[in-house]
Image (spheres, grey):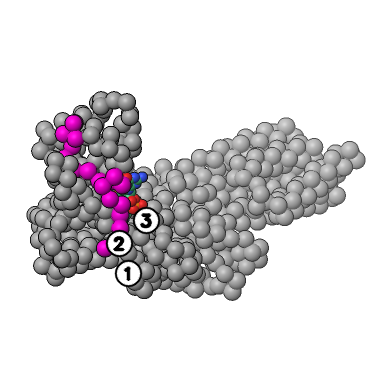
Amino acid sequence: MEVSQFDRALAQAPSVAGMRALRLSTGGFFFAGGILGIFAALTMDGDGVARVTVTGIGLLGAISGLGILALGQHLPRQGYHAAVMLGTLMVSAAVILADGRETSVALSTVYLFGVIDAILLFTLRVALMQIALSEVACAASLAIVGVPVGDIVVIAGSSVVVAVSVGWLSRAAQAAEEDPLTLLLNRRGFDRRLEEELSCFHRTGSHLSVVVLDLDHFKTINDEGGHDRGDRVLVECARVWGPVVPEGSSLARYGGDEFALLLPGLPLGPAADLADELRSLSPYGVRISSGVAAAQQGDSGSTLVNRADVALYEAKTTGRDRTVAHGDPDRSASELEQAIEDGQMVLHLQPVVQLSTDEVTGYEALVRWRHPTKGLIPPLDFVPEAERTGAIHSLGAWVLEEAARLTMTCAGPRRRIGVNVSVHELRTDSYLERVAEVLGRWQMPGRLLVVEVTESVFDLDDPLVLENLCGLRELGVGIAIDDFGAGYSSLGRLEELPIDLIKVDGSLIEAIRPDTYEAPILEAIVAMARSLGVRVLAERVETAHQAAVLKRLGYDLVQGYLFGRPQPR
Ligand code: C2E
Ligand code: MG
Ligand code: MG
């Protein structure tokens, strides 16, 4: 799996080869080569036609150089490969046209420009092709004008020696900027690129963002799996992220378990989206927090990275496993968290009814946001956002606390209460502790609580989720699969999971036809549940006909507007 330094050099351009370096060096070489060509033409012997043509080639080279210097940032990398090839052909034409030994030999030194440009800035594979082309063109054109073989060997040989030494020296210098484990840039290399891109940002005012990514609980990975496992995780991160980051960006291992990504041309929002994408690609189910900041006028490299670090700190202290973008209210957990603190959340309870007895056996707790200006906001309008910003952890904690309070302080018999739990909460290692603490404080028996999770949770195959669910079962807490049948259920996994209730999605209840009592899918689900020893509940029951069909099929528990809407207590 690990890539050798040589393989990588073959396929990857040296770290100095930013667009700016490509533009300045290639443009500069073209311009200088052109001027030198014109000078050689003016001083050479021979007929007027050759002199005019060589002057023309020199002029073309100089003008192309100016063009590349001015507009080279719009040229793709392959454009530079083609330019160097074209330059080699132009030098060959000039060498042949000069046709006087001294001037031809003098002009042949210009081949070196292309050789140095290629070895410094292209991948080794492309550089070797360019150098081979240059050597053949040099030898052939000098032979055509009658330069003795010995002289050709000296001239072509010197340029090979220059190419090898420049290539070796530049790649040795690059090693000082490389992390030996992941082969990404190290902090020193990143800081140099950052300074370069910042000066470009201050000049042009285009966007520039920095993302810092930090592995959550890396110490535990090292402690439990040994340093080898820790190393493997880091190498794997570099491997899966490498192909995803945009061309021209710089991904670095910034510290022990911290990565940094420099994104020229990207504003804050898209940079944060990219950070989310990288987090979702983390290997071995490792969770990652990230902080993002965009460059502002007057920023130095350290102020910019500091802002990204502040955002990362916020991500770490508000539940981890999330991205916070510095200065972006949409990416900050604070609005919803403030609303929770200000008491703007309410729980509505919807009764769960036993069909055989018509008795209310429990409730489902459904959260709403009583917004001071926007009115009552339904959960689907803010839960996904809370999951993205990480506020879901505070929201989940509030819902659990309120559900326990409502259950334990109600008059009359105590009934089970279902709370909806996000997968983000189940992927937190303190989750189980939090539930146990709330149950203990309210002296609430575990059996009065049901945790509702959607079936997608089970596709994750995350050991921590499973561990938390098993821990909940040990506390006596019930586990329900919510919205069953709405997505692609992994039926095969049902048997391994510690569930005791299947909540059949309302879309399947809605599909019950008014003119029949047949509902083969609902029938199959109830049979499967029975064989697994798990109870079933039908959601969103709205009509008496639906209730009658469900009763006939053997559904015992139901929930829906027919039996009661969600209401505040
Ligand atoms: P869910 O857990 O499947 O909740 C059932 C949804 O169906 C609720 O929508 C409920 O109001 C609605 N419903 C109940 N009976 C009927 C009916 O007869 N007909 C129709 N058309 N709808 C009915 P609600 O309250 O808007 O909640 C939507 C989803 O938001 C919930 O789906 C749940 O996934 C999520 N949610 C609600 N509260 C929380 C919470 O505290 N935490 C988390 N993480 N998610 C929550
Ligand atoms: Mg639910
Ligand atoms: Mg549901």
The answer to which of marks 3 and 1 sits earlier in the sequence is 1
The answer to which of marks 3 and 2 sits earlier in the sequence is 3
Name the residue at 48% across, 72% down: 302
Picture layout, residue 387 above or below residue 487: below
Circle 3 or circle 2, nearest the eye = 2
Q: Which mark is residue 568?
A: 2
Circle 1 or circle 2, nearest the eye = 2
Residue 494, position as x, y percentages in the image: 18, 38
For badge 3, the amino acid type reads Pro
Name the residue at 80% across, 37% down: 97
Q: Which residue is mark 3?
A: 379
Q: Which mark is residue 317?
A: 1
Q: Quadrant of residue 2?
A: top left
Marks 3 & 1, CB-CB < 8 Å contact: no
Name the residue at 50% across, 44% down: 124
Give the spatial CA distance, label 3 vs label 2: 14 Å
The answer to which of marks 1 and 2 sits earlier in the sequence is 1
Q: Which residues are magenta?
A: 551-569
| Left or right side of 372 for 426 | left
Element type where label 2 sits in the image: strand
